[in-house]
Amino acid sequence: MRSSPLYLEPRLEPRLRSVLQATDFLHTLVDALGSPLNVVLPEQITENEERFRAVYQRHHLSGDLYFAHKANRSSALVRQLAVTGAGMDVASLAELQHVLGAGFTPDRIMATGPKNREFLWLAARAGVIVNLDSKAELESLAELVGKYVLPRVRVMLRLSAFQAPGVKVLSRPSRFGSHVSELDTLLDAVERHRDAVELIGVAYHLDTIGLPEKAVALETCIRVMNECQRRGLQPRAIDIGGGFGVNYLADGGQWERYTTELTNAVLGRRPALTWQGHGYGLRSESGTLRGALGLYPAHRPVAAEGYLDELLSYPAPSLGRPLATLLLENLYDLVIEPGRALVDQCGVALARVLEVRHTPTGDCLVRVEMNGGDVSLEEHGVLMDPVVIPRDGSRPAPDAEAVGVYLIGNLCLEADLITRRMVFLPGLPKPGDLLAFANTAGYFMDFSADHALQQPIARKVAAYQENGTWRWRLDEQYWPITCTGEQS
Amino acid sequence: MRYDSITDVIGNTPLVRISPAVHGLKNIDLYAKLEMLNPFGSVKDRAAWNMTRGGLATAMERGDSIVELSSGNTAKALAVIAGLHGLPFKSVTNRMKVPEIKDLLLLLGAEIEELPGQTECLDPTNTDDPLTRIHRVLSESETGYLHTDQYYSALNTEAHIAGTGPEILRDLDGHAPDYFIACVGTAGSSTGVATVLRGHNPAIDVVGLVAHKSDFIPGIRNIDEVHEVGLFDPATYDTIESVSADEAIDGMLTLVRRCGMLAGPTGGGAYHGAVRHLRKVDAELTERRTAVFIVCDRVESYMSYVRKRRPELLNQPPRQNSVAGLAPAELTAATVIDVESAQKWIAEDHPLVIDLRGPFAYAALHIEGSINIVDELFDELLHGGLPFGRSRPVLLACPVGEKSVRYAALLTRMGHPDVRSLSGGIIGWRDAGAPLVRD
Ligand SMILES: Cc1ncc(COP(=O)(O)O)c(C=O)c1O
Ligand SMILES: Cc1ncc(COP(=O)(O)O)c(C=O)c1O
């Protein structure tokens, strides 16, 4: 019996859908600039920012949004944000240099994560906000400010290891931030270094999709702010980090069918769905399913600004009132650092099909001109089908039969699979066709790409619309002022 | 009936016929096995007692804790049994999704640990299922544990092989029914009962019910999760079908409103699944048949579950003096006052200043001389009438002036002659540089 195709079609909003339909445009780009090629859509990021702002408005909250730069290196995306009111969250010296050059003034930049001395110095010298990862970092910063006679630095304190009331809510231990239990010594140090630093807020970033853990963290921050005020410090903002998530798939039913069939495949109740029976974390032990599905929940009805809305409406675990109400009535600003969610729908990775081959064991392999590092969907556990963009502009015939294929890369390594799972396509692609990996701007484009085998790293272009047609520039040539649709 | 211990009351639950006028089946007698009448409230009392009774003496001697992965009825029964024997009980759960049960467990003295949610960024080192994690925690722990292990322990199934199954046979005069329908959580009850009944009637049709994949029905698993259960063997069931949360609630409504059985959602799900399955065969039958389904627990713990999914079922008549009933014209007609004028007004006329924010925020910073009545409480007070005289002017303040204007309109409607709302709220007050104090 032939199994029916298990599609995982990407969710496409109008702008991304439109560029994927511009097939000549995309083929011309890859012909000229090579495969793989990354395309970013800067105009989309403005729209995403507005959606987050709307949630602020609905809850009457004020405060700033900082894009977590680590999600994408694109200059176009960063420069686009420079013309809106957004800020930038930078986590390395190079990222800081990049955003200063893109036009961000220091009041709109926040340095996060553990920092080396050079990063700390440039941050302090430029006068950006420093989100302090530890007490030791505070001491180094104060020392730099004293030694090089720098102006007082605005700082936030990143906290971790929050404890819930009533029920113990376990959280994965974080390597970042200061333990809440050591708050007193930390605040003592802030007071001691009053001349060097000005405390403007407290922060957390938790790598979890669980609302209860975040609610505990946010409520704790509200209590910590109160303690700061009792000490006479005057912080105004609570920074709740990123982690708002993205909904990658168009159809929740497809996701459910796929994961059910994956379970059946792991238990041996249907033919394998993955290369050599890989189980994505699941395994079978005497017929019982063990392990945990190591996949991003690709269909997430509540994600991005919707997730923020849900968190803000969530009741605080001990104070009871919704978290947004607590922020508001305590007169605190809300700061967020979305990465993945802010670049939702902002880009696509293109790769040319080189070869389509059937193995003696009956598998179909599609070799593409890219490697696993160029589109790190698998590494991040996001399962999403590529869109086939035929060379000749044809669409697959309506009666064409769906095929299950494995996508392999250009590294000559057995492990260089673009997908460890069988990907179902509505028809067999031909050499010369493009595979478009949609919605890859958040972490899947350039986060892990490197020069193995001296294969080129994908170039990046920024695509934008002018009078209804798609135009492009190299990413580094894109400045939003020349691409506003009026004239160029 | 007299007993020496509450644990002796476990089991021997009644088998009650559902009226054909309710289920509409012509040729089938449908019976409910009322496991909800067990002393701690559910079918899990049997499993909990059977999994612990043998180990209690040793555990008491060594001072071990009882530990289980459960967020529901098993935890509840184990908490009671632990309490009876002076032992601590710890429940580890993925998520406490039913607040009433969480509160009840805390009341019973249980310790609850909630496991972390899924990571936002994929962490390849994190491939453990909750059970494997518990096993690891237990093996690393210094102190002793009695881990009942409901998803794997044969003692769970055994409780139903020895009790539930034979009771059904006895009550049907020694005959096994033709159909048996049950929801599957740990699979203990359905497996145990099916084993006994099939022994008497190999032709019996056993239906296992799971939740629709995207739905949550507290106490049972969905079609994928069921494979994680050690006791689950697909061969136990002739068919596995799924029920949605809505169907379970509909079934529950029939049981509570028309059958006098105060069943919870899985009882309702079993009823719905039973009637759906039996209706297909009923018309073809030429002789009478018998079917049994299990009612696992009671409705009372699921009020917030129902409120969330089907709020219309708990509909209440609109209340008096409610901001929800204000007309737009009343809102625009309410008096607002800006910060500067408010400061002057306070100094001259000493209005009662009411701060509608939460007590935590009020304690941190507020307008000097104001009193704090949090909005929820204020709302309650107003249902009963004006909580202050009409002669005293009132200034209402909330964070941004949005709530206060509603209450100002409502108080005006209730006949107060001089209520004003602080425009821009406490935030506007602060931003205007007006003083806030902390006592
Ligand atoms: C401190 C901090 N802020 C923000 C983010 C962005 O998270 P996300 O892309 O999930 O929104 C990260 C991600 O690692 C982070 O570490
Ligand atoms: C409310 C409810 N219904 C049904 C069941 C299923 O019973 P079993 O675990 O024996 O399959 C449970 C068990 O957890 C339950 O709590």
Image (tube, rainbow, N blue to C red):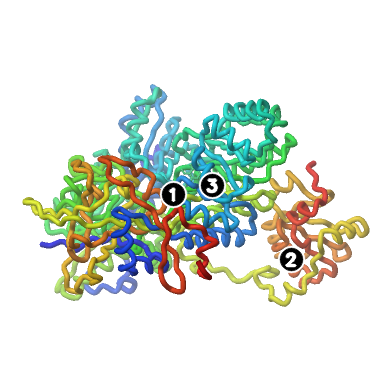
Residue B422 placement: quadrant: bottom right
> Which residue carries the number 2 mark?
B405
Image coords of residue A345 (percent x, y): 42, 60
Q: Is the residue B273 above or below the residue A455 in the image? A: below
Q: In which quarter of the image is the N terminus of chain A?
A: bottom left
Of B398 and B416, nearer the camera is B398
Q: How far apart are marks 1 and 2 (CA)?
A: 45 Å
Instruction: Name the residue located 17 percent from the left edge and 63 percent from the top edge.
Output: A428
Give the mark toward the camera: 1 or 3. 3
- Mark carried by residue B296: none
The residue marked by circle 1 belongs to what chain? A
Disc 1 within 8 angstroms of ligand 1 (CB): no
Judging from the image, what secondary structure is the residue with disc 2 in? helix
Q: Does residue B164 appear anywhere in the picture?
A: no
Q: Which callout, 1 or 2, points to the residue nearer the camera?
A: 1
Q: Mark 1 points at which residue?
A: A72
Query: Marks 1 and 3: CB-CB under 8 Å?
Result: no
User: Outermost residue, right direction?
Assistant: B348
Q: Distance between the Cα atoms at labels 1 and 3? A: 12 Å
Q: Mark 2 lies on which chain?
A: B
**Position of residue A263 in the picture relative to residue A47 (left or right):** left
Local crowd size for mark 1, using a 10 Å CA cut-off: few (<14), some (14–19), many (≥20): many
Q: How many labels does the image show?
A: 3
Which residue is disc 3 drawn over? A99
Query: Relative to B155, is A325 on the left or the right?
Result: right
